[in-house]
Image (spheres, helix red, strand yellow):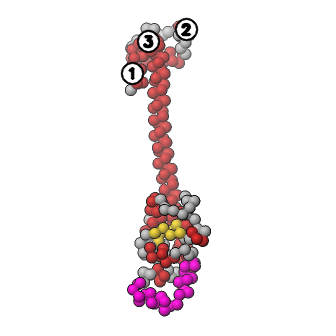
């Protein structure tokens, strides 16, 4: 799933991303997921693609801004300890993502990649669900087409039966091939009429009326 330009994400995409990582922020792991973060930022060539989306809390999302994860982490590490302490005691609390993103670069990347894999897997499941739903819909449609085709055949038969009925022919008495040729009826159709008439102990006219009424229902 990919969008050609940056825009508002479809609600479905957003929901799938935000439910990954147990609905927690990917970066601080205990902030609630509130934003869809581009792991590789748009400015760095990252795309609007599900493989590039992870859930993030608003604070991490806005702290990371348009940086890659490693660049973000390096910038945090480059900050003087006094700066970090100032933000800690300045009321930002340890929920400040700049203070929470504390794993090794390898560990951090590994964790982010595992969340990315989880998001992709969730989308694959969604695609499978959608495909199965579509398949079910197509089967239902095919069944309705089958019914329609049955009705069409009934109509054709009804028309034929009416033609016979108009001639007041009782096909239950097994018409001869010569007669069938004369009225330009093929054997299969004649057999059908014969069977219908025999089963119902009806004349052709009655079968014709019933068939036409049935086809019109
Ligand atoms: Zn966070």
From the viewer's side, name the closer residue of 5 and 183.
Answer: 5
Residue bearing mark 3: 165
Give whichever of discs 2 and 3 has the lower sequence position: 3
Q: Is mark 3 within 8 Å of ligand 1?
A: no
Residue bearing mark 2: 182
Residue bearing mark 1: 213
Give whichever of discs 1 and 3 has the lower sequence position: 3
Q: Position of residue 126 (x, y in %)?
A: 49, 56
Q: How many marks?
A: 3
Q: Are marks 2 and 3 in contact (CB under 8 Å)?
A: no
Q: Is residue 83 magenta?
A: yes
User: Does residue 158 lie above or below 170 as drawn?
Assistant: below
Residue in the picture at 45% in, 90% down = 86
User: Does residue 163 lie above or below 96 as drawn?
Assistant: above
Residue in the picture at 46% in, 43% down = 137
Range drawn in magenta = 70-93
User: Does residue 180 lie above or below 119 as drawn?
Assistant: above
């Amino acid at each position: 799933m990919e969008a050609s330009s940056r825009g508002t994400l479809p609600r479905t995409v957003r929901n799938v991303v935000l439910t990954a990582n147990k609905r927690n922020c990917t970066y601080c792991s205990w902030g609630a997921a509130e934003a869809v973060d581009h792991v590789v930022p748009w400015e760095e060539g990252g795309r609007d693609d599900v493989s590039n989306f992870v859930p993030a809390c608003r604070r991490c999302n806005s702290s990371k801004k348009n940086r890659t994860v490693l660049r973000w982490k390096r910038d945090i590490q480059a900050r003087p300890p006094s700066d970090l302490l100032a933000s800690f005691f300045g009321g930002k609390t340890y929920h400040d993502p700049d203070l929470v993103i504390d794993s090794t670069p390898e560990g951090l990347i590994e964790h982010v990649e595992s969340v990315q894999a989880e998001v992709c897997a969730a989308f694959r499941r969604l695609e499978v669900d959608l495909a199965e739903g579509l398949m079910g819909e197509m089967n239902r449609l095919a069944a309705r087409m089958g019914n329609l085709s049955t009705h069409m055949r009934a109509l054709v038969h009804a028309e034929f039966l009416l033609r016979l009925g108009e001639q007041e022919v009782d096909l239950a008495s097994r018409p001869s091939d010569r007669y069938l040729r004369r009225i330009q009826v093929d054997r299969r159709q004649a057999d059908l009429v014969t069977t219908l008439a025999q089963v119902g102990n009806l004349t052709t006219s009655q079968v014709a009326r019933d068939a036409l009424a049935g086809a019109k229902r």
